[in-house]
Structures are given as structure tokens and as C-alpha cells.
Image (spheres, rainbow, N blue to C red):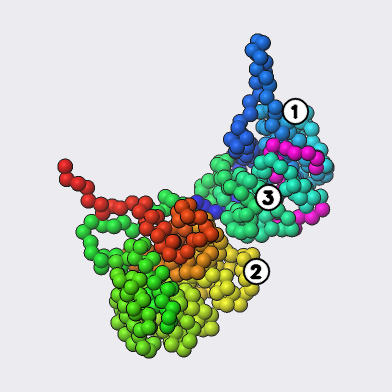
Amino acid sequence: MRILVDSAQMKQCDRNTIEHFGIPSLVLMERAALGVTEEIERRLGAYRAKADLGGSGWARPRAYTALVACGFGNNGGDGLAVARMLWQKGYAVTVVMPPEMKRMSEETKVQRGILEKYQIPLCSQMPEGEFDVVVDALFGIGLTRELTGEYREYVKEMNGKQGLKVAVDIPSGIHGDTGAVMGIGFQADVTVTFAFAKPGLMLFPGAGYAGEVKVWEIGIDRHSFLTEEPDLFCLEPEDMAGIPARRTRTNKGSYGKVLTIAGQKNMAGAAFLSAKASYLTGAGLVKVMTPEENRVILQQLLPEAILETYADASENLHDSLAWASVIVAGPGLGTGAKAEALIQEVLERAKVPLILDADGLNIVAKHQGWLRGAKGTVIVTPHLGEMARLTGKSVPSIQESMIGIAREFAQENQVICVLKDARTVTALPDGRAWVNASGNNGMATAGAGDVLTGIISGLAAQGMDPQRAAPMGVYLHGLAGDVQAAGQGRYGLMAQDILAGIARVMADVPDSGRIRPIR
């Protein structure tokens, strides 16, 4: 599991590493510069100048050209060290830095002095012409104001140049915590960030400016939190080992029972997608509660499911709630009086984990108190529009603070909040949160959210803690879309294709219940 840190946490970790553990700031700066330099070398082919040796006839190859733009803070100091390292490797380096000296950090003054002793020239005007590599070291993660004046012009001119574009720690103009673009942002091909990834590199629009993100170890690690604990994470492939293993001697009842309350008259698709995803993720039994009109089509689409149809809101519901290990409520349900009565009763009675989605959320948006009165653990899975209705905030304001708003909603309502967007955020009532990095834009298609509810319910049915099942379900959902998009492209990706991807992804989960052959 990858740790993410915001700007305040990163500054504290940096301070703790220097003051508590005694690692000098210049050592951290040198290691950061080394990481950027090695990434440039790897991508440009690691130029090595070859002098003519003994009349061998070897021609000295053309030196790579590098433009390094540096600010006055420690990010600029990183850039000055990068410029020196590239120069020592034979690059023709041009360093651009505003002329004012009074705001320069002490470490950056040292790095500038080293460059001057090597007689590496600095200039204050952005040069014309093209470069093989353009390095942005103007501002780090501490920037909170809009870029204006000469800095805006620097970024604009760098964006207009050709060559490999490399950002040091974070592209200048991108908010380190939210990913917001502050007036203008440096458009990087690769961002080399240090110690931990930053939320602004994961969330859009910042993620679209960062390019490929490489995390470089500089000597700051989890120990640097001291008594604090990290609270923001990103799942990685090795975390799939935490999915409940299949045991050898089991039956369908061993893997949980999912009750899916979904689909109003003639809208059986949402119920099908969610229920099938539950099965594909590993649930043992799935019961679909839906109007009688959906019976035939669901029996044809998913004969493995148990069907429970209803004529009024309370008919057979009590027994089904008692039967279930986990409940999904809302996909395609509608928002009429009958649907409202169902959602209210489920929230009042259910003692098992409940995943509330789609129309279930639209109903709750009109009855906020129902969430706070729920007896069991509730997972809400709103997209941006549904979150706007739940919170009364505008979609743009939610997009500007995905992590903060998801956390606020989770804490105020004591629910697990899965706030869906291009980079989905899952927040727990205790403040912990996950930013998901799997998935692709082909998954912006009808029914994809119904598949997600099914995946989360399938994990929870097998006994996975809902606080782990929610972020893991989001991660698996994205992986399923990725494996399908890799084979068929993104334009024609449909929810049923994501279903096919689930089976492929789950095939990689460790299976402790496999019986070895007798030899």
C-alpha cells in the first residue's frame, strides 16, 4: 500500500528527518537531485561523452541540451543540483533563475554557490530555441497561490518547448493537496516526486499535468512520521493478498449472501450488473429483490441468482434482511413512494453492511437523518452529481476538494464514503482515505457504478471488513476495466465488459484452497 502525504505532512516529515534523525537537509537535496538526474538519464539514453582516444577515430557525440528553471525555495535548490549533475555528465545546461536573491533558502544559496564555482552560467531570461530536456524546479508542493508575472511566463514558455519535460516533486502551478491548476501548470512528461506521492499528483486535473509519476527514495520514510500515523493511501497489486482466501472444504454458504434490492419496473439491467459482479467477486449466494415485471429477464440473464419479487414495500423484506450477509440497495430502483419506503426500512432494520447506491442515494438526499439512524455499517457510493445532492455543494466545488469533502461526509454521517470520479476517493469515518489509481476513461459508461456496488458487496459477503472492502472494491473495479481496455480499447467498453474483467482480475488472487495433486 502506497502512502500519500499532503503538503503539511510532507513538510513535517522533512523537518522530523532533519531535526530528529539528524540527516542534513543538503543530503536530502542531493539525493532528490540524483533521482531526477537518473530518471533523465534513463529516458534520454544515458549520454556519455567519448573523447578521441589514441587516434581511434571515435567521434565525440553531440551533448544533450538541458534547460533547468529554478525558483528560490528548496525546490529550486533541487533544480540547481540537477543542473550541476547533468553538466558533470556532459550535458549543455542552461539554468534560468529570477535575479532576486533575498528570498532564497539557505540550501538553495549553497547550491547556487556550487554552480558559480563550477562556472555554470545562470540567466534570468527564458532562452529561445529547443532543448532535449526541460526541467521544472520553480515551485514545490507548498505553492498555494496563482502563478502570475514572470513565473507564469516561465511556465508558458517551457510548455511551448519541445523535448522531455520533467517536473521536480510536482509540476509548478499544481496544488499539492487538491490537484487544482493555479492559473497555469507545467505540462510534464514525468514527475519525480520524493519519499511519498502527493494527492495533487493523483487527483485531476493535476494528474493530467504530472505525466508518469516516479517516487524516489531520499531518506524520508514512514519512520519520519514519528508518533503520527499516515492517513491517506493508494492501493497497489500486492494489496490483493488481503482478499479473503478460498478455503478447501467449503460450500456456497461459506462465502456469504448478498441481497440486492434493485431495478424498478422494466429496469432490470442495474440489478443484473450488480448481482453478477457480486458472484464474480466470490459471493456464494445472491438474492435479487425486484418487481415481478423483471422476473423473466433476470432469470434469463442470471439464472444463478435467487429471485424475490415484491408487490409492496414491506412484503418479504424482513426475512430477506435476516438472511443476508450484506445488502445492496438502490441501483435502478427509482425514487417513488415504494422505493422510499424500501430504503427507509432497510436503513432502520439492517444490521449487516449496507451499500447504498444510485437511487438509494437520491432518496437519502431528501432524508438525511435516515443515514445517521442506520443500525449497520453503511457504504455510500455517490458520483459527483449524487454527492452534490447529498451535500448541497456544486459539482465544481466537490471536484476542487475531493478528499476533504469525502472525509467530511464520512465523519458527519458515520458512513464509508466512496466518492466516484476519474480518481475515486474512499473515506472512512475515522479520517483515513484512499485515492484510487486504477481504471480508465473507457469506464465512463452506463452501468459501471452498478458493477462497483456488486464488487464491494462480494468482498464484504466473504467476511472482508467493509472499511477494507470499499477501497479494495474500487481498486478491483478499475483493474477489471484496465484489463479489458488493454484488449479491446476504451471507446467501446461497456459495463458487461467490466464484468468479464472481474473474472480475469480475480484469477490473480492467491488461492489457498487449491488442492495439490497426489503423486
Q: Secondary structure at mark 1?
A: loop
Q: Position of residue 209 (x, y in %)?
A: 65, 52
Residue type at mark 1 is: Tyr
- When asked about the image quadrant of residue 352, the answer is bottom left
Q: CA distance from mark 2 to mark 3?
A: 22 Å
Q: Are the residues at dot 2 and dot 3 in contact (C-beta closer than 8 Å)?
A: no
Asked if 253 appears above or below 230 in the picture, the reply is below
> Contact, CB < 8 Å: mark 1 with mark 2?
no
Q: Which mark is residue 118?
A: 1
- The spot of residue 257 in percent (x, y) is 31, 71
Q: Position of residue 180 (x, y in %)?
A: 66, 59
Q: Secondary structure at mark 2?
A: helix
Mark nearer the N terminus (3 vs 1) = 1
Q: Left or right of 187: which side holds 352?
A: left
Mark toward the start of the polypeptide (2 vs 3): 3
Label 2 environment density (alpha carbons within 10 Å; few <14, some 14–19, many ≥20): few
Q: Upstream in the sequence, badge 1 or badge 2?
A: 1
Residue located at (72% from left, 37% from top):
131
Can you tell which of label 3 and label 1 is closer to the viewer? 3
| Mark drawn on residue 396 | 2
Type of the residue with mark 3? Gln
Residue 163: tell me if it is visible: yes
The disc labelled 2 sits on which kind of residue?
Pro
Q: Residue 187 bears which disc, if any? A: 3
Residue stretch rendered in magenta on the structure:
126-149
